[in-house]
Amino acid sequence: MTDTSVPATALEDIRRVACVGAGVIGGGWVAHFLGRGYEVTAWDPAPDAEARLRRLVDAAWPALEQLGLAPGASADRLTVTSTLEEAVARAQFVQESAPEKLGLKRELLARLDAATPSGVVIASSTSGYPMTDMQTDAVSPGRLIVGHPFNPPYLIPLVEVVGGDRTDPEAVRWAARFYEAAGKSVITMDREVPGFIANRLQEALWREALHMVAGGEATVRDIDRSITEGPGLRWAIMGPMLTFALAGGEGGMAHMLDHFGPSLKSPWTRLEAPELDKALYDAVVTGCDDAADGRTIADLVAERDRGVIAVLRATGRLPGSGAE
């Protein structure tokens, strides 16, 4: 197998997508692709994978209906196969979503490369590993790219696309166009960076939150409310950079940097990871239980989905939902 025909299929001819790994992320991808009208084959080694996957798709379908189903979209277009090879045999695009273990990723991507028809792009949902580190065992590494989604993939539009050192640049460009055609909002990264873009920003916030819980400076409920009732409202409209530019008034970012630049050296944040000892572990788990206030995980998923859809609709990011 060679990379001479990467990618081999025109975007308008894509009908069949394979999803390998059917956990929370992989299952979310399955739901997304089904909602966009594709035929989906899925494989996961867990013995109860099919039952779990179909429950996830059923739970996601009301949100997909609100987002707007593509013509022909149906949960009946899902086939769960007994082998990886069967799942990718006729695939025109492959999305891998295995657990975050580098050895497993290398082995699985090599298997997918060997089993997938020539010229078909294979994407990994990895949330942290560079493709350069994962494509080492593949015979045809040129078609391997990262397509990093956000949970749940059927609801959150963003996907970050980047190749590795041995990836064909055309595979990256093709994948970005495919994801856009499949309803995603795409960032095509110029170079690899561990954790990509959004996860690095999330990680900074997450670490500081853990420090505050560990130090008794804030509860889990306080931390979540500080975002949902504060900067999170602004970030749904524009990101932190333009938000800070507005803090400079008519002078924009230049005035903001002149005014607040010296405070960058103030010890406000502690970006080193705190020690996740039992006390911190228990505090975070108990704090989340308290913040849930009796709501089950299923309740919270439904609440999150309704809320995100409302934000997308209010900001004009759903088809036909122009913001008013």
Image (cartoon, helix red, strand yellow):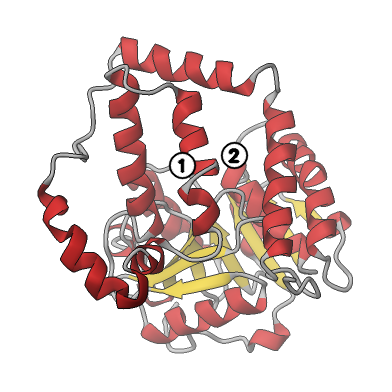
Q: Quadrant of residue 236?
A: bottom right
Return the mark for residue 41: none
Viewer-nearest residue: 204 or 237: 237
Q: Quadrant of residue 129?
A: bottom left
Q: Position of residue 251 (x, y in %)?
A: 29, 76
User: Callout 1: few (<14), some (14-19), or many (20+) C-alpha neighbours within 10 Å?
Assistant: some
- Mark 2 or mark 1, earlier in chain: 2
Question: Which residue occupies 49% across, 66% down?
Answer: 238
Q: Quadrant of the C terminus?
A: bottom right
Label 2 belongs to which residue? 45
Q: Tell me if residue 102 comes above or below residue 123 in the rendering.
A: above
Helix, strand or loop at mark 2: loop
At label 1, which amino acid type do we have?
Answer: Pro
At label 2, which amino acid type do we have?
Answer: Pro
Question: Which residue occupies 77% across, 35% down?
Answer: 51
Label 1 belongs to which residue? 99
Helix, strand or loop at mark 1: loop
Q: Mark 2 vs mark 1: give the one in front.
A: 1
Relative horizontal placement of residue 165, taking residue 289 as reference (left or right):
left
